[in-house]
Image (cartoon, rainbow, N blue to C red):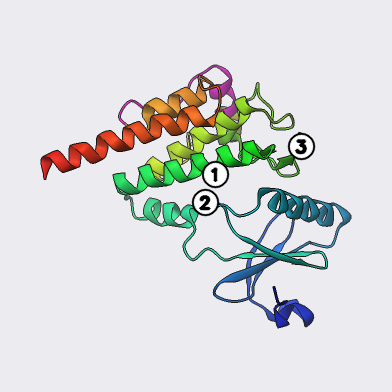
Amino acid sequence: MEVHHSLQGSLYDLPILSCGVSGVIFELSDSAIVKVPCGSDQSREELAIESAVYNRLGPHPYITKFLYTYNDMIVLERLQYPLRKRLWDLRDVGALPPAKDVLRWAIQISQALHYAHSRYLSDFAGSSIDGSAPSVLPSPYSEHPTMPSTRPSIQSEMFALGSTLYEVETAQRPYHDKSDKDIKELFRTGDFPDTSALMLGEVISKCWRVEYEDVSKAVKDITRIQSNYVNAVESSA
């Protein structure tokens, strides 16, 4: 793929989209962004790991498309309306996502995670390749204190998936109104938010309580819930 001409000039003439622990993201075009290391050796190493992860993954319909690398930078597909931004917008106006979208997103997220695991990668509980120590750690709301993300496992990933699905359906993170310290203590004692009224409540609860052997079982349950929802909508039409 041809290198974008802006990469050969001053990047700081480009609009900055965001800054993170491993780099700065600049806008290349409406369809591409470039992630640049912050300048430290650790930042360059983390970006190199991220590049290796994308190369290992290859193309997948539910994973951001990796375009190419240029020097220490990686160029990625630009998402037009990221799910996290969509959920934040809904939360800010006190709205919930439509049920059909919740189910579609839940299946897409779960299938993407299942694919990552099939490539010996971890995702939600911290980026890791071949069991290496993760370079990016999750927030307390997606990590169980007894399953530290410094040692990624299927169990820690399933727990994080449960928190992600909770946010997808409610547009809020679990215990969003509590401190990190309180969240850790609640999770430690097995005290999770009530999910009984949620469409995905059964799946979320089983993720938090680590009752799934792997992500494929969660995908199966979500698919069943989606099928029941579609049948109910069609029968009431």
The residue located at (46%, 62%) in the rendering is 81
- Compare marks 3 and 1 and give the one earlier in the sequence: 1
Q: Is residue 96 visible?
A: no
- Horizontal and vertical percent for residue 151? 73, 29
Task: Determine contact: label 2, label 1, CB under 8 Å.
Answer: yes
Q: Amino acid at mark 2?
A: Tyr
Give percent across and percent down for residue 194: 38, 26
> Which residue is drawn at the image coordinates 78% and 81% (left, top)?
8
Q: Give the mark, 2 or 1, whose residue is nearer the N terminus.
A: 2
Residue on which the image places disc 3: 130
Disc 2: CA contacts within 10 A as few (<14), some (14-19) or many (>=20): some
Residue designated by label 2: 62
Q: Which residues are magenta?
A: 183-197
Left or right, residue 152 beside residue 205: right
Q: Is residue 51 above or below residue 147?
A: below
Q: Is residue 5 magenta?
A: no
The residue carrying mark 1 is: 112
Q: Residues within 10 Å of mark 3 (few under 14, many from 20)?
A: few
Name the residue type under label 3: Asp
The first of marks 3 and 2 along the sequence is 2
In 3D space, how far apart are the residues under numbered discs 3 and 1 (Cα atoms)?
A: 17 Å
